[in-house]
Image (tube, helix red, strand yellow):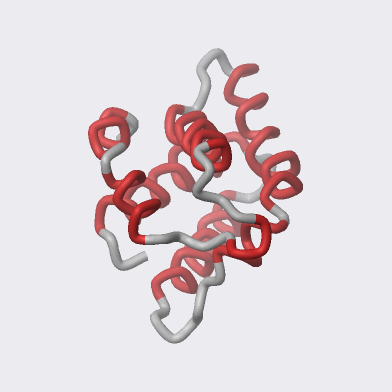
Amino acid sequence: MNDAEICAFVEKAIYDEIIPVLDLPRDELVSFASAVTGRFRNPYIKHQLLSIALNGMTKYRTRILPQLLAGQAHGALPPRLTFAGGADRLYRESGMVRAIQYRMTPTGYRAIKRCGPAIAMAR
């Protein structure tokens, strides 16, 4: 996560939209979140989009959907998680995804960066 905008977006999603609706001790959640973002920042850990994407729907159903439902129950959908879900769906339907070659291409990265105004609105 060496892109400052994307890093800020992810951290705000974690701290503003995920942690507040989880029913666990806050200090444990913050510690876990810090470890996760630390791993993302570690340039020596190679983050494989293929391995992440292969379980994308499972991860969505088990991690993101409950957050969206919890946000809805609290009266507001979490904007960053809602945006991320929509962006993922658009990316998958765009034809840029190829079954075994799922990876972020320069074209895909530029497409996501063009979402900057929407990311800025979700801050």
> Horizontal placement of 35 versus 51: left or right?
left
Q: Residue at x 63, y 39 (%)?
A: 64
Name the quadrant of the N terminus. Answer: bottom left
Whole-percent x, y for residue 14 in the image: 48, 47
In the image, is residue 93 above or below residue 27?
Answer: above
User: Which quadrant of the view contains residue 49?
Assistant: bottom right
Q: Residue at x 56, y 51 (%)?
A: 97
User: Which quadrant of the view contains residue 112?
Assistant: top left
Query: 4 or 29: nearer the eye?
Result: 4
In the image, is residue 102 above or below residue 95?
Answer: below
In the image, is residue 33 above or below residue 119?
Answer: below
> Horizontal placement of 82 versus 9: left or right?
right
Total of numbered circles in the picture?
0
Name the quadrant of the C terminus. Answer: top left
In the image, is residue 57 above or below residue 70?
Answer: below
Farthest-out residue, bottom:
44
Q: Residue at x 39, y 51 (%)?
A: 108
Farthest-out residue, top:
75
Query: 57 or 7: nearer the eye?
Result: 57
> Horizontal placement of 42 versus 77: left or right?
left
Whole-percent x, y for residue 45 in the image: 49, 81
Query: 71 or 103: nearer the eye?
Result: 103
Whole-percent x, y for residue 48 in the image: 56, 71
